[in-house]
Image: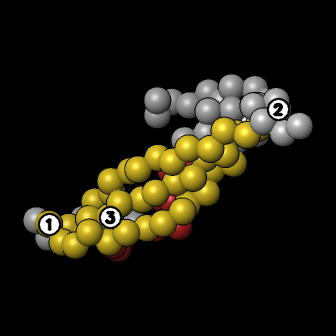
Amino acid sequence: MINVKKSQVFIELDIANWDNTEFGSTLYEMCETNKEYENDLVEVHQVVFLGKRKSQDHYLIILNITQDINNLGKPVENSYR
């Protein structure tokens, strides 16, 4: 029997300069930094544009995290936590 834990993470993102931003790489980095264990599956669920604030584009990034409790793998060393 598979024992799965699912959760969501909400991250606010402000982008001041699109010329210096690789949005795909930023989303990938967000997924990687939200892994707790090596077998975690972290996916972008939704990117919501919340509008402009102080000449910056403001977004809400929603990530889905799925963990197989029976097969977590090794803990991920993450310097962002």
* Label 3, label 2: how far apart the Cα atoms are: 33 Å
**Alpha-carbon span between mark 2 and mark 1:** 43 Å
Q: Helix or strand or loop: what does disc 2 sit on?
A: loop
Residue 6 in the image: state x and y as whole percent: 62, 44
Q: CA distance from mark 3 to mark 1?
A: 10 Å
Element class at badge 1: strand
> Label 3: few (<14), some or many (≥20) within 10 Å?
some
* Residue named by callout 3: 59
> Residue at image x 38%, y 50%?
11
Single out the residue that lies furthest toward the front: 1
* Residue 16, x across and y down, in percent: 24, 65
Q: Which mark is residue 71?
A: 2
Q: Quadrant of the N terminus?
A: top right
* Mark nearer the N terminus (3 vs 1): 1
Q: Amino acid at mark 3?
A: Tyr
Residue 29 seen from this side: no
Q: Which mark is residue 53?
A: 1
Q: Which mark is residue 20?
A: none
Query: What residue sits 46% from the left and 34% below the top?
Result: 80
Q: Nearer the viewer, residue 29 or 48?
A: 48
